Image (tube, rainbow, N blue to C red):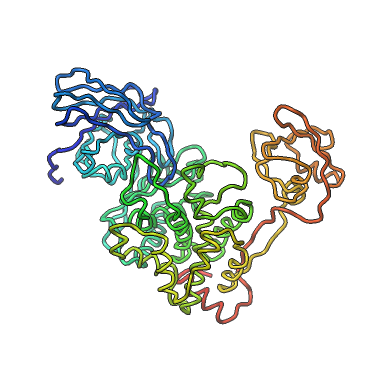
Amino acid sequence: MSKMKKNTGMNFHLSIPKPHEQYLHIDCNFDVNQEQIEICLPSWRPGRYEIANFAKNIRGLKVFNEKNQLVPFVKNSKDSWLIDAGKSKSLSVKYQYYSNELNAGSTYVSDDLLYVNPVNCFIYTNESLDHLIEIDLDIHEEWNIATSLKVFGKKLTANSFDELFDSPFICSDSLLKKSYRVKGILFNIWFNELKDVPWDKLIHDFERFTARQIEDFGEFPSKEFHFLIHTPPFKAYHGVEHLNSTVIALGPAYDVFKRLYSELLGVSSHELYHVWNVKSIRPSAMRPYDFRNENYSKLGYIYEGITTYMGDLYLLKSGIFNISDYLKELQVQLQRHFDNTARFYTSVADSSYDTWLDGYVQGAPGRKLSIYVEGCLLAFVADYLLRKNTKNKYGIEEVMRRLYYSTEVGKEGYKETDYQNLLESVSGVSFQSFFDNYINGSHSYEPILQDALAYFGLEMNLLDSKLISENALGIKLRPIQSKYVIQSLSMGSPADMCGLCIGDEIIAVNNIKLEGNLEQWLGYFNIQDIRLTIARAQKMIEKKIPVVHRTFYPKYQLNVLKEKSPAQLKALQSWICDGSL
């Protein structure tokens, strides 16, 4: 055990005296040398580019001096407080943080778990940002601690708030851990409350995608890394990146090594790639992070889109996925892209900027794109263009490797021009039209996607949806209990033409009340004879469905061509490297 540094910053004491209330009790102590001091709580957390308003979870904030006297303060913004310290030499700020949400970026307490993302709930001052932080944990003696922070018994330390805010921790007596090494780097896999972990298979698969990512970059940015994995009993799929760790929430637990195993591998590979792409290679708008305000960036198609593309691709390149497995993942992105009418109205760059506005909610219909989906597809196209113009010598891995090793990018962060310049220098051709049309424009992706697929000997087929509500009416439904609520409509579809709208609930078909059997009744009647009864704003409305001689919401399916040219076979083999056809 190494010797602890002298504390020159803040000390936090954490306790959960009444776990059933789900309030985390926090006592923050620090020295002061000025009469007024501002304490702040972050407004957002890296990895989720929206204002989170964590301060809404705080209650009972009080301030005391070294004489245990109450010190006055005023709230001067939604998540900052101005303390009138007077002649006080030290302050103790006591407050409680409501911790009832369990996901990969939250804070949660219960009888058997303390899970903390410090960026949610730890206050800071501008003067303390670069000072040592100590955390004393008042937890059960038998509880173990999973974290990338330095651990001394039940005490944790961080060298700065930048490190602290990037270092979640889990405390529990149900933690399981196994480790592996790649290129001398120690990787730790932690599970909380999970039975019968198939460690041999898991370690084997994790080693393979880890080794392949490190091989392409040439080094790993961290000395040690932790996969902190929650497996709750409810449905969950979420991951959050950090420099020295990641938190993953995947459930229900009984499916993690069955139906959800490919999801576990995918999200783990995705989050590991983030250690380079966004934790090390970061847009200039986020270097350094400003935790009090929006960090606007139009580059989400890089830090989330390329990561989405490469996270799955590395499962193919490392031989964990075969080409069929991988194409199933890629066609999910294609389906989401073509089902979203926002592709006609906006660009992925503008949608990246607007994640701070409505990036993580459904929002207005047809208004925004997903930086994950669109960025993934554009990364695939960029990869194709690079390989095509370098005779398969270089792909997008080379661009990201050069971006990572760029001294200027490492210090100041990158801009769109840095990425474009690297694409052009590696490929030897201009990418201006690519950026004008697809990154910053709303041109159709379909022609260039078809070109990319054909280059690798792949094909995209369109199949009719098996749901009559989708292929004939042109609606997608949102399951709400046993109700049929319209989630989206295809433009020019019968549903669109007859005036149905998002949020309408379909009650009956031809005056027959639905009881979980919409598709059956749609199939029973001829489409031209159908009348729908809907509920809208407490009113019952009847709509006659017009006849349209086309289908809607087709299903996109990717396949490898049975007969490939020598050039296609060479390109495909170069693209997947050690992957299996």
Which corner quadrant holds the C terminus?
Answer: bottom right
Q: Which is nearer the eye, 354 or 272?
A: 354
Q: Where is residue 193 in the image (x, y as percent from the top left)?
A: 40, 39
Q: Position of residue 271 (x, y in %)?
A: 40, 53
Q: Left or right: 300 with respect to 556?
A: left
The residue at 32%/38% (across/down) is 118
Q: Which is nearer the eye, 503 or 323?
A: 503
Vertical placement of 269 versus 113: above or below? Answer: below
Q: Which image quadrant for residue 215?
A: bottom left
Vertical placement of 531 versus 187: above or below? Answer: above
For the image shown, how many numbered marks are present on the structure?
0
Which corner quadrant holds the N terminus?
Answer: top left
Q: Left or right: 33 with respect to 427?
A: left
Vertical placement of 197 versus 387: above or below? Answer: above
Q: Left or right: 158 with respect to 525?
A: left
Q: Where is residue 391 in the image (x, y as percent from the top left)?
A: 48, 79
User: As drawn, which residue projects farthest toward the top?
Assistant: 69
Q: Left or right: 173 with respect to 301?
A: left
The residue at 57%/64% (across/down) is 324
Q: Which is nearer the eye, 423 or 510?
A: 423
Q: Which image quadrant for residue 456?
A: bottom right
The residue at 64%/33% (across/down) is 481
